[in-house]
Amino acid sequence: MWRDIFNPENLFFRILARGVDLAGLSLLWVLLSIPLVTAGPATAALYYTVVKTFRQGRDDAFSIYLKAFRDNLKQGMLVMLVCIPVAVFFAWGYNVMSNNISTSVGVVMYMAYYVVLLVPAGIFCYLFPMMGRFTFRTGALFRTAFILSIRHLPSTVIIVMLTVEMTVFTIEKWWPLLAAPVLTMFLTSLFLEKIFPKYLSEEEIAVLTDTEEIEDDF
């Protein structure tokens, strides 16, 4: 009886272990994202780890995460050096548009800009999961993220809205930091893990990018 109660494979301890992974990985992601330029590789590693642990059942979550972070650090920082000024530019544009919605023309321009934002936001949402799951050259990574975000536009809209809502909710409160990063990656993976396998054949990958530039990790 006591052996069954304290068996690390029983349901209670498995749930407890997943809870530790949920909070620990979320806080680790926050910590590694503080320099901002490392937020990209931290996100790529988090997506990869969530897929491997929460979806595929592996147990060594933290070692998987740290290895993935190291593997993606160099390219991820380079990608962030591109993404940060682009994000600042679009954020500035959004601020300008939102401050001019007192007129009917301003409202129309605001809504149009809001729709336009879906494209760069969608690219950002694909970039780092792809970096975590595949090996791309940087140019091919951006190119493929753009193509996938357009080709799977309904999923892109859902992923963007999900990410934005989780981000806003987390900013308004503090306690979601204990779970929101991992939950966001998990919910995003429900869409992306159905999209990515469609491009694993040699012929389909060739449509997106040069076949020598990508290596899958499925």
Image (spheres, helix red, strand yellow):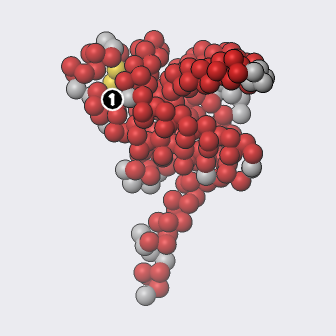
The residue under the point 39% across, 54% down is: 57
Viewer can see residue 14: yes
52 sits to left or right of 88 = left
Residue 175 in picture, x, y percent from top left: 71, 53
| Residue 184, quarter of the rendered image | top right
Residue 52 in picture, x, y percent from top left: 41, 46
The residue under the point 49% across, 69% down is: 13
Query: Considering depth in this image, is 194 or 82 the residue closer to the camera?
Result: 194
Query: Considering depth in this image, is 128 or 213 the residue closer to the camera?
Result: 128
The residue where tag 1 is placed is: 216
8 sits to left or right of 111 = left
Quarter the C terminus occupies: top left
Numbered disc total: 1
Viewer can see residue 49: no
Residue 118 in picture, x, y percent from top left: 54, 25
The residue under the point 52% across, 62% down is: 17
Q: Is residue 38 above or below residue 170?
A: above
What amino acid is at disc 1?
A: Asp
Q: Is residue 18 above or below residue 152?
A: below
The residue under the point 46% across, 31% down is: 156
152 sits to left or right of 117 = left
Quarter the N terminus occupies: bottom left
Q: Residue furthest bottom?
A: 1
Mark 1 Cα within 10 Å, few/some/many (few <14, many 20+)? some
Residue 31 in picture, x, y percent from top left: 69, 40
Helix or strand or loop: what does disc 1 sit on?
A: strand
Q: Is residue 19 above or below residue 152?
A: below
